Amino acid sequence: MRFPKLPNPGLDDRIPSHKELERMEKEEAGDRPKWDNKTQYMLTCVGFCVGLGNVWRFPYLCQSHGGGAFMIPFLILLVLEGIPLLHLEFAIGQRLRKGSVGVWGSVNPYLTGIGIASMLVSFLVGMYYNTIMAWIMWYLFNSFQDPLPWSQCPLNANKTDLVSECARSSSVDYFWYRETLNTSTAIDSSGGLQWWMVLALVSAWTLLYVCCIRGIETTGKAVYITSTLPYLVLTIFLIRGLTLKGSLDGVKFLFTPDVNELMNPSTWLDAGAQVFYSFSLAFGGLISFSSYNSVHNNCEQDAVIISIINGATSVYSATVIYSIIGFRATEKFDDCADSNILALLNAFDLPEHSVTVNNYEEVLQGFNSTSPDIIQRLNLKTCDLQQFLSQGVEGTGLAFIVFTEAITKMPVSPLWSILFFVMLFCLGLSTMFGNVEGVVVPLQDLNIFPKWPKEVLTGVTCIVCFTIALIFTQRSGNYWLALFDSFAGSIPLLVIAFCEMVSVVYIYGIDRFNEDIEFMIGHKPNLFWQVTWRFISPVIMLIIFIFYFVTEVSGELTYLVWDQDAEEFPTLADRQYPGWIYGIIFILAGIPSLAVPGVAIFKLIYNRCCQKDSGFREDTINSVSAKIQMKEKMID
Amino acid sequence: MLVWILFLLCQVGAPALAQDLCQRDAPNGYKVRISLKTALGEDAYEWNQSEIFFFRATMAFAMRRHFQIETYNVDNIILCVQTSRVSFWFVVTSPDNATMLIPKAEVEKAVRISRHRINNAFLLSDRTLEFLGIHPTLAVPVNPDTPPWLIVFGVVIGAVCAGIIALLVSSLLQKRRKEKGMTEDGQDEEDMQVKGVENGINLDGTYNRGFTDNDRFTKL
């Protein structure tokens, strides 16, 4: 019994048959680029999947959703959602041997919208992701000095005291919000471009261009470094971290399981979303990379290996991050306790070292009963190690505030700072390779600029992205970036991934897909793949999408600002978005998502009205034999 | 007898007078707080009478240095309210009149000028030898003329631009070489066709170029 599928006429004309694939393989025909070796391919895919999210999103999720217990939903959803989707993208790319637009256009011309949506999402995400790279480069450039510029507050104009904004918050906060971003207080006060940020952005885009200039020919060489260096640095940090005081407290805090969190649906939702975004699915980059493989490459094995590496990297980097966070929290706790003890000693003129951390409580009780008013005036702070450990540690806050603070407390800080930011840079750069691939290859497939060589196309893409990304170098740039991050990189991807699964299973036909895989790797996909592709993964995607959509649409849309005059300063204050932001949100999230049905409708109308009088159907022009030029001499 | 009573009174009165001058929260006095164990740890010395004498001598030196006169002596520095913290109050009397105190502002100036010498005398720092009310001058953070980040940025941009130019030039050269190769091949084919094909052996096509169909039109 064949699995039900929608009618899809002309499919055989649009895709190369198995015989043609064999012939292409043997004669190495076609001008499609190829990987130099399997290692390059694996390193590129690992680099694309392993990114900044593994370092600064997963550890936070793990710790806030019950520590060790979070591994359970994470691993379950990795197996049920991540691996099947990954295998699907690898297999379809390897079979149809085109980028995302080409693949979905071959499956059915009305599905070209999926490829275009992938291209738009890669474009939007690439723009803001490379701005984060610019920030990382800025910190990297500033790490070549001792003492590090974020370790001390500058003096005010009179040289009598520290700058008040810095004294009220901290030197790392000040360096991030003032000297790096020079942030304004609201998203609509633009404040002009900050020249140092523009320079950093220039360096990020030119470095990306030089690595992507010839497509996988150059990125394939670059990934030898960008994909392996992060692991080396993580190991160095792990060894250094474990020798610091308090690091084991951090690791314990991370992994202490709280099984009650498993009852909370948001834990499962966050785990699903993290698995999905962590695999860089639906960007189109993975389909592209896979299409450069030889036809009989074992994509099933690749999918499993890359998923395992991705999951293991998340856990490993979480351990490293939290060992350093444990160290920082212990330092802060010690500072807090010491300042309390000093206040007590000074107030009551007690000899030094008479009050230590051990007898602090009893001494305080004693004095509280005899002279409570003096104790009141002292304003003693409560020092709680758990509170220091759980301080806002995800995203840019983790990298640029918490971790940089921890680094200033380590001996030979500039070295650790350089290592850390080089690692972040490599993690981000290898992800950007996939993004650029996801934009440039669809442009080539769509044949919009037919005569342009790849170098020029890549260059133009970089320049256009750079120009639009200048909005992130304004004083309000950080708020724009958060906006892009929440909307451009979330909902559209879920829509695209769901459409991809449905297209392959129901429009391409899961039976044909199974036969293709049998042709490529030698055996049919087993029951696990069948069940997950047909039912489980699409259902999971749908559930996550619905929940995301409902939470975004129902809640008030607010964002956090750094406002000196706010009451909560130095904590970030909540502000409501202005009205016109909803238009921007629609552009970011709506247009890529609506491209999927939109292009289909457009093609339908175009075919119905404009192709009625022409003699031949579009399909025949799109056939394979017209495109592939065999190396036989053509006789005129 | 009278002289002896006067002498006794002086012996008793002078310290009492001194005690009146120096007291907790004295208007012209300063509180000093010393944290020996924090500063020196294991090598901390004991705060005893000799150290107090040393302090008084250092302060007298500071006053001499400030006023540029050499009349100040150890007796002019009076300490009181000493605790085990170690902290105490001190006042400075004028060398001319033992009952007159030097105003607070002058003492502060004297301390500021000689702060570094005073700290070093006791192997302490601004943080561990505190004069409550006299704030230490803050160390100016080092500000180099060219920010170091610009230098690193320049190096990186230079390397990247060199890389881009090198790759683009090599692409162009490759393309030109390919085009040259192709036109040469094309020329060979044309030569073969012009030179005359004996029986079409060179081309494995089905069309024999040697055959021309225009016999019908030419009249010999």
Image (spheres, rainbow, N blue to C red):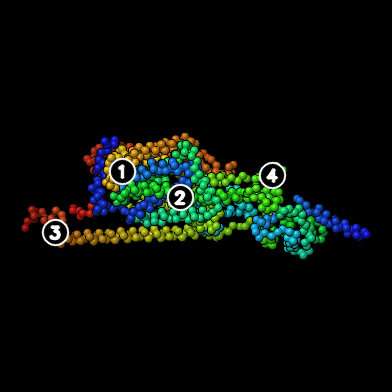
- Which residue is denoted by mark 3 in the rendering? B201
Placement of B9 over or under A272, stated as above or below? below
Image position, residue A108 (x, y; %): 29, 40
Q: Nearer the viewer, mark 4 or mark 2?
A: 4
Three-letter code for the amino acid on which mark 1 is drawn: Pro
Q: Residue furthest bottom?
A: B70
Q: Is residue A519 left or right of residue B95?
A: left
Image position, residue B143 (x, y; %): 57, 58
**Picture residue at 35% right of the left edge, 54% below the top:** A39
Q: Is residue B191 left or right of residue B108?
A: left
Q: Earlier in the sequence, mark 1 or mark 4?
A: 4
Label for residue A316? 2
- Which residue is denoted by mark 4 in the rendering? A366
Label 2 near label 4: C-beta < 8 Å?
A: no
The secondary element bearing badge 2 is classed as helix
Disc 4: host chain: A
Mark 3 vs mark 1, CA separation in Å: 51 Å
Disc 2: host chain: A
Q: Nearer the viewer, mark 3 or mark 2?
A: 2
Q: Nearer the viewer, mark 3 or mark 4?
A: 4
Disc 3: host chain: B
The secondary element bearing badge 4 is classed as helix
Label for residue B13? none
Label for residue A525? 1
The secondary element bearing badge 3 is classed as loop
Kindly indicate whether the residues beneath marks 1 and 4 are on one polypeptide chain. yes
Label 4 near label 3: C-beta < 8 Å?
A: no
Q: Earlier in the sequence, mark 2 or mark 1?
A: 2
